[in-house]
Amino acid sequence: MRPGARNLITDVAGLRVGNAADDRLKTGVTVVVPDEPAVAAVHVMGGAPGTRETDLLAPGRLVERVDALVLSGGSAFGLEACGGVMAGLRAAGRGFAVGPLRVPIVPGAILFDLLAGGATDWAENPYPALGRAALGQAGLEFALGSEGAGKGATTADLKGGLGSASAVLDSGVTVGALVAVNSLGSAVSPDEGRFWAAPWEFGAEFGGRGLPRVGIPGADPRPGKAQGAATTIAIVATDAILTRPEAQRMAVAAHDGMARAIVPSHTAFDGDLVFALATGRRALADPAADGYALCHAAAACLSRAIARAVHAARPEAGDTQPVWRARFS
């Protein structure tokens, strides 16, 4: 296994990613757009999710493919970003055919960033426009850290952000992860800033600081930020041909990567969620062995993406948390 050429989810053939953010509001939207409708699934582990169209992604539903996936800040207001993406896709002629009509299928998930230091005095919901703007920026290259859906994200003790990573398996299959880290837990060990995800790091992709030397504190963990103001939302993707149940299994496995990189994860106050996306460009030569490796790679990529999100965060006016680089570099 090795990182892809960009070390981004867009190393998965057939995917583009776009970010849009508002500096004054300290919030934003990230959209993943497959070149063609792609098989999608979802798995929710957190106790406080905020979602749109996720019931549609259960095995056995009529529509198996999506036109885009959306990650957004803004809590429940941010769900409207999906509407902006839908409008842009409809204008481009994308969507599920219903007679002469096209209905873009755009599931999404949100995180809570309304207490991140940005303005909240807007009179009109800004998220439809941010969603459409993110769609318009979709491409192969995109920035990490304080960008898109990670603009106002925070963790227990540091500023969070948007992260991504990829891996190419020995079979030639590519896996990628994209995540907005806004967790109640911490991505680093106490007092030394070494990432819990360090065992899966390639080179110095998030600082190369090595394995944590300090274990999890013996005392019971206490929330480091406002309860209800958390959630880590992610997408794992592959160019493999997968059925929806197989894609859902990849989403389930990817949650292991979240739990390895954020301590604690999946609390009652987080809405932790992972979408899975399969563009179907490559057949699995050995479905059993390759599927096994695929799920492991999805978890490892998500761990790395989480660490890269926190590592890449940059300081901005009004921040409520320090950034990793200022505290530990």
Image (cartoon, grey):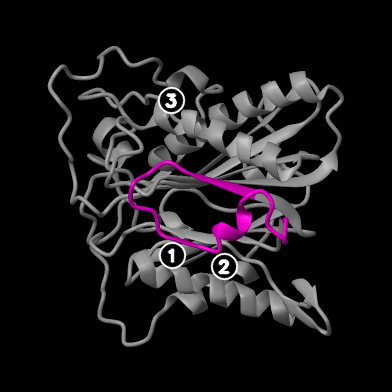
Q: Please state the extent of the stretch shown in magenta in the rendering.
A: 41-64
Check disc 3 and report the residue beneath it: 197
Q: Quadrant of the C terminus?
A: top left
Residue 275 position within the rendered picture, expressed as x and y whole percent measured from the top left: 57, 47
Give the residue drawn at x 74%, y 54%: 38
Q: Which mark is residue 28?
A: 1
Give left or right: position of 269 versus 81: left
**Disc 2 residue type (three-letter):** Ala
Residue 116 in view in this figure? yes
Q: Of marks 2 and 3, which one's residue comes earlier in the chain?
A: 2
Q: Secondary structure at mark 1?
A: strand
User: In the rendered view, would you say 192 is above or below 185?
Assistant: above
* Labelled disc at residue 134: 2
Rendered residue at 37%/86% (across/down): 124
| Residue 225: x %, y % from top left | 19, 47
Pick the front one: 102 or 315: 102
* Dots 1, 2 in contact, CB < 8 A: yes
Which residue is depicted at the point 24% across and 45% down? 322
What quarter of the picture does the N terminus occupy? top right
Label 1 to label 2: alpha-carbon separation: 9 Å
Q: CA distance from mark 2 to mark 3?
A: 29 Å
Residue 153 location (% of width, % of height): 34, 53
Q: Secondary structure at mark 2?
A: helix
